Amino acid sequence: KAGVTQTPRYLIKTRGQQVTLSCSPISGHRSVSWYQQTPGQGLQFLFEYFSETQRNKGNFPGRFSGRQFSNSRSEMNVSTLELGDSALYLCASSFWTSGRPGELFFGEGSRLTVL
Amino acid sequence: AQSVSQHNHHVILSEAASLELGCNYSYGGTVNLFWYVQYPGQHLQLLLKYFSGDPLVKGIKGFEAEFIKSKFSFNLRKPSVQWSDTAEYFCAVNATGTASKLTFGTGTRLQVTL
C-alpha cells in the first residue's frame, strides 16, 4: 500500500512569490491534514480537509490556504511568501471513523526555503 | 486551546538504560493522546495512542506510556533502549470533537550511545 506522497520534496522561492504544494493521501483515506514544522515552533497545525471540506483551521494568516479534490488529493498554497515561511510542510492522511481520529500517516514533507 | 509540554529537549542515554520522556498537556476536556517518532531521515510515525480504557498503553518496539489524568501527563517509557531508538519523539494531544487536529509538543531528541 503506497504511503502519503508529497510533491515537490524541495523548493526554493523568493519573498513575494507564491507556492503550491501537493499531497496524495493513502488510498481510502478521506482526511488530509497539513502541518508546518520549524526548529523554533515545532509542528503546528495548518488545516484539515475531509471530503473536500475544510473541517479545521489553525492559527495561520489568510496567505495560507488549501483545498481538497474529489479523489482526496490535497493542495496547499502560500501566497506572498515571507522569510519566516521557510519550513518543512507535512501532509498527513487518516481514515476517519465516527467520533475519533484515526492514526495519522505522514508524508516525508516538502521543504520550502524562502530567500 | 490545548497545549503540550515536553520538558526534556535533548536526552542522551547509553544502550540498555531505561527511558522516560515527560509529556504534560493543558486542556480541561476529554483528550486523545499520542506519541509519534521521527527517525533520522524518515517521516513521522505513530508509536502508540490512548483513547480510553486502560491508562497504560503499549506501542511498537517495546514502548509504553501511562496516562495519568490527575496530572495531565502521558509519559513515554522503555525499560531498555537500543541504539536504533535514536530519534526525535513527539507527544501530541487531540481534543475530542476536533476531528483529526493534533497539537504537538516541541519534541525530545533522544541520542542513544553504544
Image (cartoon, rainbow, N blue to C red):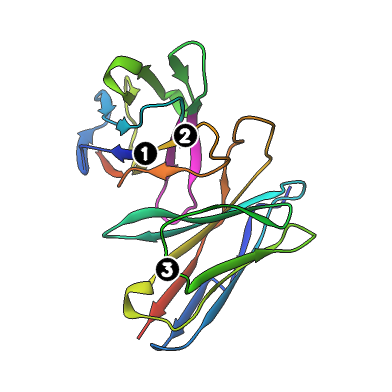
Q: Is residue A6 left or right of residue A29?
A: left
What mark, if any, has residue B2 been given in the picture? Answer: 1
Can residue B34 be found in the magenta stretch?
yes
Can residue B35 be found in the magenta stretch?
yes
Judging by the rendered image, the residue that carries numbered circle 3 is: A61
How far is disc 1 from disc 2 in space, using C-alphas?
7 Å
Q: Position of residue A92 (x, y in %)?
A: 57, 51
Which residue is at 72% across, 57% downward?
A52
Q: Position of residue B54 (x, y in %)?
A: 48, 10
Disc 3 residue type (three-letter): Pro
The answer to whether dots 1 and 2 both sit on one chain is: yes
The answer to whether dots 3 and 1 both sit on one chain is: no
**Would you call the spot at circle 1 few (<14 residues within 10 Å), some (14-19), or many (20 or more)?**
some
Please, is residue B13 above or below residue B71 in the view?
Answer: below
Disc 1 residue type (three-letter): Gln
Q: Which residues are magenta?
A: B33-48
Please, is residue B73 above or below residue B53 in the view?
Answer: below
What mark, if any, has residue B95 been given in the picture? Answer: 2
Please, is residue B9 above or below residue A44 in the view?
Answer: above
